[in-house]
Image (cartoon, rainbow, N blue to C red):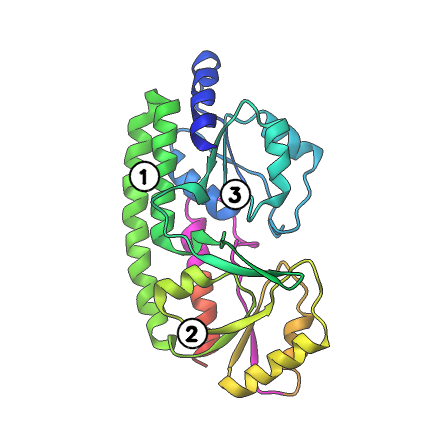
Amino acid sequence: MLHLALAFGLIIFSLTATAAPRVVTTILPLHSLAAGVMEGVAQPELLLPPGASPHHYALLPSDARQLSEADVIIWIGGELEHFLQKSLQSLANKAVLLEVSTLPQLDILQTSENHHGHGSETLDPHLWLDPTNASHIVKAISQLLSELDPSNAQIYRDNADQRMAQLQALDQELRSMLLPIRTQPFLVFHDAYRYLERRYGLTNAGALTFNLDRPPGGRTISRARAKVAEHGIRCIFREPQFEPRLAEAVARGSEVRIGVLDPIGADLPPGPEAYAELLRAIANSLVSCLSA
């Protein structure tokens, strides 16, 4: 998909563009990585507004216009931005598509899904929560923009080198921060943190919900309460994009604390530094809840 779109996009782009490519990204972490590469040339656009979940988003007319005017669209892929799959074919036929989950350098995790009693393996799309994956994404954005916009290629490459060095430093910083709480078990709202858990050896004891489209029932709450007692869990983490009631129901009557983890940075201002701020906020939240 990327290669076909890339070849097609390069032809269109070379015929029509003199300015820097108009880049649209779907979620804040991708926007931040692209903004770091494009610094000093132009700013990418962010499709999803702050606080919106890619799992439940519906395109607005202004979004459709943004997509149809884009030269480059950077997204994770159909496993995360379901709402985009059909729209990209109809609205973004002149854009180069960078589908991040298809990049061969990324270390991708599979996740098990259960539909009507049948299990299936699918790609876990929360891949940006590992800084090594983020570094590969930065490199891919830089290579693509350098091909589309050769006059600014050196800036893109220099920016990418600088951002990749910063990501390496961030990785070390997070490792030191999270080391003391590695063995402390916790529960999350939904299973979005496996890349972070694998990278830093964290002990996730499970997720409260496996289907974001269906509100969990009483059985889910009792199972989670049993898990809290069995594993001596100190913290349940909810997410700001979803109702807090489930975490509150599980924690009721126990000593367990409720923390907040936000995988996409609902409250962060967009920009080149947002990615590092997002991961630091997740690490701080884990540390403050689990070490108290």
Q: Nearer the viewer, mark 1 or mark 3?
A: 3
In the picture shown, does residue 49 fall above or below 202?
above
Q: Position of residue 197 (x, y in %)?
A: 41, 66
The residue indicated by pointer 1 is: 160
Q: What residue is drawn where x is 39% and y is 23%?
A: 148
Q: Position of residue 247 (x, y in %)?
A: 63, 73
Amino acid carrying label 3: it is Gly
| Mark 2 Cα shell of 10 Å, populated few (<14), some (14-19), many (≥20) | some
The residue indicated by pointer 2 is: 203
156 within the magenta span: no
In the picture shown, does residue 227 fall above or below 97?
below
279 within the magenta span: yes
Range of residues picked out in magenta: 254-280
Amino acid carrying label 1: it is Ala
Residue 265 in view: yes
Q: Position of residue 76 (x, y in %)?
A: 50, 44
| Mark 1 Cα shell of 10 Å, populated few (<14), some (14-19), many (≥20) | many
Q: What residue is drawn where x is 43% and y is 23%?
A: 20
Quadrant housing residue 210: bottom right
Q: Residue furthest top?
A: 15
**Label ID, residue 96:** none
The residue indicated by pointer 3 is: 77
The foreground one among 69 and 11 is 11
Q: Secondary structure at mark 3?
A: loop
Amino acid carrying label 2: it is Thr
- Mark 3–mark 2 Cα distance, whole angstroms, equals 28 Å
